[in-house]
Amino acid sequence: MVAGLEKGLAVIAAFDHERPRMSISDVARHCGLTRAAARRYLITLEHLGFVRSERKNWMLTPKVLRLGQSYMHSARLPRIVEPALQRLALALKEASSAGVLDEADVLCIAATSAGRVVSSTLQPGTRVPAYCTANGRVLLAARPQAEVDAWIARQVLAPLTPHTVTNPQRLRIEIARARAQGHAVVDQELELGLRTLSVPLQNHRGDTLAALNISVHASRIGLDQLVNDYLPALRHAQAQLRTLL
């Protein structure tokens, strides 16, 4: 392990929509560094062009996008999934996205809106909590139960909307339901008005590599219609991708 690289990446990851600008003291506190160490990392990242300073506050620069772009251009999974997303969205006229589990979150690796702007989270690179999303639940359903129990025990199940499942036992039930049915439906738990239906994306060995979903606005599509009308198309895309993954 190269500790300097680990801490430098942690400094970059510390910036998000809640912390777009931070002082040296903020970075030190969030990353568990001394103020002197945080200053050295920020100066180094500034020299490399990844951050800039303004009035004693530091912020990321667009150059950070090159890190994510390297993955999008080189990784096989997004390149395989994206055409299927485009076909699915074109056929259903609804937004679609694919994501992978990254610790507590689902990280979007590919997305298309199909002209339907239903959520700002439906774009590559965005992160959403796994516990209250359909993609998250089908990805968790692929894990052994003991691993799921340990994962739930580590989470803070915040009520993002009045519909969010925050009871650990009920969340276990929802994940077990996703495992049994092979799909998950989440109704306005992440955002009011947002309904999602998701299926796992598996390779020919049955390993779950990602999750694929359709997102709709609750005012247009009911829960029964979401499952009855859209699940067959998701299953078709799932079967096509299995031969490629």
Image (tube, rainbow, N blue to C red):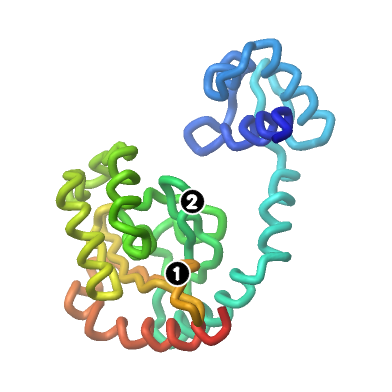
- Report if the CB atoms under discs 2 and 1 are less than 8 Å apart: no
Q: Nearer the viewer, residue 200 or 69?
A: 200
Asked if one can make out residue 131 in the rendered structure from this viewpoint, the answer is no
Element marked by disc 2 = strand
Query: Considering only vertical position in the picture, is 151 above or below 9?
Result: below
Left or right of 244? Residue 210 is: left
- The quarter of the displayed image where residue 236 is located: bottom left
Query: Considering only vertical position in the picture, is 70 above or below 105?
Result: below
Residue shown at 29% from the left, 73% from the top: 183
> Measured from the top left, where is residue 85 in percent x and y?
50, 77
Residue shown at 29% from the left, 75% from the top: 182
- Per the rendering, the mark at residue 102 is 2
The N terminus, quarter of image? top right
> Measured from the top left, where is residue 213 in percent x and y?
39, 71
Residue shown at 26% from the left, 67% from the top: 178
Q: Nearer the viewer, residue 194 or 29?
A: 29
At label 1, which amino acid type do we have? Thr
> Measured from the top left, where is residue 46 in percent x and y?
78, 29
Left or right of 51? Residue 85 is: left
Badge 1 crowding class, 10 Å Cα cut-off, few under 14, some 14 to 19, many 20 or more, is many
Residue shown at 80% from the left, 36% from the top: 49
Furthest-right residue in view?
47
Query: Considering only vertical position in the picture, is 24 above or below 4?
Result: above
Element marked by disc 1 = strand
- Per the rendering, the mark at residue 208 is 1
State which tag comes first along the sequence, 2 or 1.
2
- Of circles 2 and 1, the one toward us is 1
Query: Considering only vertical position in the picture, is 106 above or below 18?
Result: below
Asked if one can make out residue 50 in the rendered structure from this viewpoint, the answer is yes
- The quarter of the displayed image where residue 13 is located: top right
Q: Nearer the viewer, residue 52 or 143?
A: 143
> Measured from the top left, where is residue 103 in percent x and y?
45, 47
